[in-house]
Image (cartoon, rainbow, N blue to C red):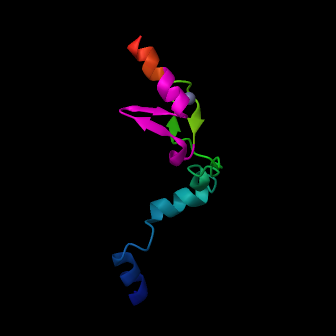
Amino acid sequence: MHAHEGIAQRLGLVLPQADIDKIHGNPLKMLAWWTPPVVKPKEIITWKCDYCAKEGTDKSEQFAKFNYVYCSIKCLGAHRQKMQG
Ligand SMILES: [Zn+2]
């Protein structure tokens, strides 16, 4: 009986023998869950013009009015006119 093993086991640091066998039997299975990290595009679309559908990344570039977001004051006006008929 080794005292150290007892402590490790109590702390959950020792794998049950069944898991060890699994890992030894299928070393690649250990990595099966791992997928290469997806390279994120630098620019994340944070808003989309409700009139012309242009997408933007910088919220400071958007024109927000009521529940709508526009890429320009032109779109804001055009959309408002359209809605008013
Ligand atoms: Zn627009």
Q: Position of residue 66 (x, y in %)?
A: 35, 33
Q: Position of residue 62 (x, y in %)?
A: 51, 40
Q: Ligand 1, what quadrant?
A: top right
Q: Position of residue 71 (x, y in %)?
A: 55, 34
| Magenta part of the chain | 57-78
Is 61 in the magenta?
yes
Quadrant including the C terminus: top left
Question: Which residue sits furthest top?
Answer: 85
> To which quarter of the image does residue 23 belong?
bottom right
Can the viewer see residue 67?
Answer: yes
Residue, x 59% and y 60% (percent of image)? 24
Q: Is residue 78 left or right of residue 5?
A: right
> To which quarter of the image does residue 81 belong?
top left
Q: Is residue 16 left or right of residue 54?
A: left
Q: Position of residue 52 (x, y in %)?
A: 56, 24
Residue, x 48% and y 28% (percent of image)? 76
Residue, x 62% and y 57% (percent of image)? 27
Can the viewer see residue 2?
Answer: no
Q: Nearer the viewer, residue 8 or 63?
A: 63
Q: Is residue 8 left or right of residue 25?
A: left
Q: Nearer the viewer, residue 48 or 64?
A: 64
